[in-house]
Image (cartoon, rainbow, N blue to C red):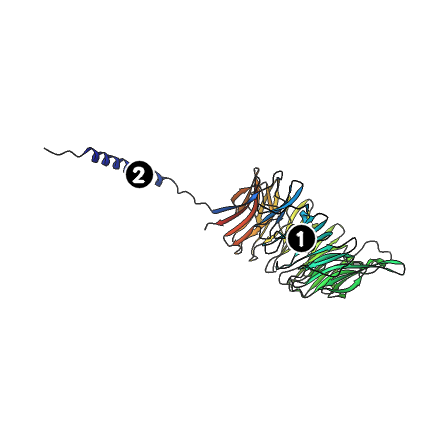
Amino acid sequence: MKKLLPVSLLVFIVAAFIVYAVAAEAAEQAADQPAAQASPFTVKETSLGKLDKGRSRAVGAVSPDSRHFAYVALVDEKMRVIGDGIPGKQYDVIEEDSLLYSPDSRHLAYTAKIGDKWTVVVDGKEGGKQYAKIMSLVFSPDSARVAYIGKTGKKGFVVVVDGTEGKPYEGISDLTFSPDSKRVAYKASLNAITDGAYDAKWFVVLDGVEQSKWLALPGPVLFSPDSARVAFVGRAVAANFRFCAILDDVAGKLYGAVTDLAFSPDSKRFAYAAELPQAPGQVATLWVMVVDGKEGQAMHAVFGAIFSPDSNRVAYVTSWGASSSVVVDDDGGGSMGDVVRSSLTFSPDSKHFAYVARVMGKSVIAADKQKSKEYDDTQETLVYSLDSAHLAYAAKVGDKWTIVVDGAATEQCDEVNAKLLAYGPDSKHLAFEAASEGKRFTVVDGKKAVEHDGAVRGSRIVFDSPTKLHTLVQRNDEVLVVDIEINQ
């Protein structure tokens, strides 16, 4: 008589067969389905805290690396700074416009009022002496030094650098560090009564030494990129408002007005716009661009020279009547309607040049003397890739915006923010912010990487490597650093 298998073993065999059959069927079905597409991005979000109650938008100070955010909050009739979501000490008043991150993004400073006096707070620590008012708080470019203007009384002002007071003056303005952080310059005045008349004398104080005196000093004090040279504009005589450019404390030719001082990146070249003295009977004023001491063609107006990165080329805008044109390398380039002065852009290799112009209600991009198609509108930001091979900008056709790369339009959307346009260091990837159907996104290589309510004002999209980038955004009432990795 044959032995029967135990019931438990039979159950096990049947169950195993069923599992195998189900698994086989699932595998067969999966084989018939297309493979799931891998996500093009890996996204990591880091919260910098939620905004204070009653604040709907993230408005405050953004660090240069776009990884930190601070703002002033009102608490029980007091004020405090909230940096990256962490509240600081309460003060009677905090000057919101004074909020300042250091260039290396590691330090946060601001001015605060205690009673009737003001102090400087750096990284949560109050400075030494307090003043009736504190103005022009600034970090040095290397982030190691701090300077500001302190008001000592009704008429007295001093510059404080690294906690040390300078000589008191009756007026001080335009405090600045040199690019190498070693030098300090500012404008100062000593008012006096000469022969019964009020006489205001202005001069630049450079590294604690007073330079030549002038009736007025309109405009900023400008260091050359190598920090060796200093330029500013001085009013020489009272009659006819005669002004000159002063370079290394040596006065240049007198003009009716002088504006838009500019050094070349190598610090060897110098340019400015100047108004020619009017001849008898002359109605319209004439201006010239002075480059390396040489006057260009006289025009009704000239504006802001820019030098190419290699310092060999110079470009500026001129106008005659209602039309304007761009001069590049002394070539006028022809009339182009209304040139957007702030759009003038050289490529990193200095070989290419582009700008925006408004013509008969339309916008065009002129790149290397070639005009683009006409658009209903364009934004003024033009971005070359780091290898200088590509040019990107925002253009509007009808009621839709698009990013145009090398003349070809990408996907249309309701809004784009060209100020956030950024190429990666290998020039292969392009990122920007766009909005469609009420939603806002960070877009990388034409694909939506992350949705949010918008980039924090003053922030930028930063590439940390060829395939990694980050941006600072707001979503609901929260501020977020969003790191995006492009999956290869």
Q: Nearer the viewer, residue 67 or 108?
A: 108
- The foreground one among 204 and 246 is 204
Query: Which-is-in-front pick, marks 1 and 2?
Result: 1
- In this rendered view, identify the residue nearer to me: 298 or 461: 461
Q: Amino acid at mark 2?
A: Ala
- Local packing at callout 2 (Cα closer than 10 Å; few below 14, some 14-19, many 20+) is few
Q: Secondary structure at mark 2?
A: helix
Callout 1 touching callout 2 (CB < 8 Å) = no
The secondary element bearing badge 1 is classed as strand
Residue 161 in the image: state x and y as whole percent: 68, 59
Q: Residue at x 38, y 39 (%)?
A: 33
Residue 317 at least partly seen: no
Which residue is labeled 2 in the image? 23
- Report the amino acid beneath label 1: Val
Q: CA distance from mark 1 to mark 2?
A: 70 Å
Disc 1 target residue: 120
Q: Is residue 10 above or below residue 393?
A: above
**Residue 331 picture location, percent across and down:** 69, 59
The residue carrying pointer 1 sits among few (fewer than 14), some (14 to 19) or many (20 or more) residues within 10 Å by Cα, namely many
Residue 65 falls left or right of residue 320: left
Q: Is residue 98 left or right of residue 425?
A: right
Q: Is residue 309 left or right of residue 275?
A: left
